Amino acid sequence: MAQCTSAMLSEWKDGADLDDLFAELYRLTTRIIIHAVLGESIDERTGDELGGHFPHAGRAIFKRMALPIPALEKVPTSDNRRCALALKRSHEIVDLGIDTYRSRETAHQRDMLAFLLRIRRDGRPLPAKEVHDQVMTLLFGGADTVASALSWCIVLLGRHPNLRDAVAAEARETLRTGPARYSDLKALKLTSRVVHESLRIYPPVWVTTRIVPRSTELAGQQIKAGTVILCSPYIFHHSGTYFPEPEIFDPDRWHPGRAPSPKDFTYLPFMAGNRKCLAYVLATNELIQIIASIVADWTVEFPDGLDLTPRPLSSLSPPVLPARLTKV
């Protein structure tokens, strides 16, 4: 993570203009998640190809969730063909990575694929399909969502320059030299609160589906077992019932004693329960480390009057974000 972040920042130039901050961060998070999950099992070129398929494949997955009508996927539109090809090629690359991994010694590897391959259930390794599906979930859940969260966090800090300066001061005091690392996390307390509040206002997973396991009643409505329902963390996060003055960006609400309990199921940037994101700790740490690494040395400014209306796609993505970089 630190190596990838350092590589990105080394290419930034004082006074330079980025066409789209989100696209820049998306390239970064794609490389991080591919390396974190697949390690060295695929080369950089194949990894870049896989990352290039993420947007199309992710859109296909989102369409399946929003409109679970299999016949619609078979309509030969150009978008359906692109999505189908992206999914097919993504599955092939993941299988290639897993097969390569199985042929190597992984006892001392620390990436997620090595962890999955070491798991034993009743003395047996996980079935190949389960390993494949877990890898696909981690990959597709760890690029677009984290890039969106990073982008929104930088946007919010840009709207609150005094807070941005305080976060930058904390980062400089903590990091000293180089990008943030895992060992820095405990000291980045303000940065952590900023990240959590940003995730509340702009949760990347703004909507998801769940299947009702048994017939029940919800808000006076009878729901039969097997019904697919939509659940929106965004609605919870913007409810004054759970978060006073929900539209105000207030990182102090995440001070110990003020933050909501996980048992309340009101703060759901990574969902909750047995379907909670497998890599939620990694994602949170990644956000804190990258934000600290950026603000320690750079100010990111956006044009006046920029339309910042979110795009509710597979994640709550920002619009195109042209930005100017200033070295601090």
Image (cartoon, grey):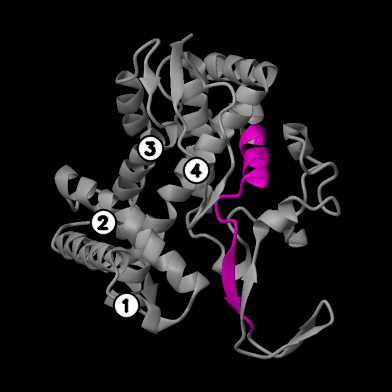
Q: Which tag, 3 or 4, sits closer to the chain's start? A: 3
Q: CA distance from mark 3 to mark 4?
A: 9 Å
Q: Nearer the viewer, mark 3 or mark 1?
A: 1
Q: Amino acid at mark 4?
A: Ser
Pointer 3: residues within 10 angstroms few (<14), some, or many (20+)? some
Q: Amino acid at mark 3?
A: Ala
Is the residue under label 2 in contact with that under label 4 (CB below 8 Å)?
A: no
The residue segment tinted magenta is 193-212
Residue highlighted by disc 4: 148
Q: Which mark is residue 107?
A: 2
From the viewer's side, name the closer residue of 187 and 30: 30
Q: Which tag, 3 or 2, sits closer to the chain's start? A: 3
Badge 4 marks a residue whose secondary structure is helix
Q: Which tag, 1 or 2, sits closer to the chain's start? A: 1
Q: Nearer the viewer, mark 3 or mark 2?
A: 3
Q: Nearer the viewer, mark 4 or mark 1?
A: 1
Q: CA distance from mark 3 to mark 1?
A: 30 Å
Q: Nearer the viewer, mark 4 or mark 2?
A: 4
Residue highlighted by disc 3: 23
From the viewer's side, name the closer residue of 42 and 53: 53
Figure check: 132 above or below 203: below
Q: Amino acid at mark 2?
A: Ala
Answer with the quarter of the image where residue 79 lies. bottom left
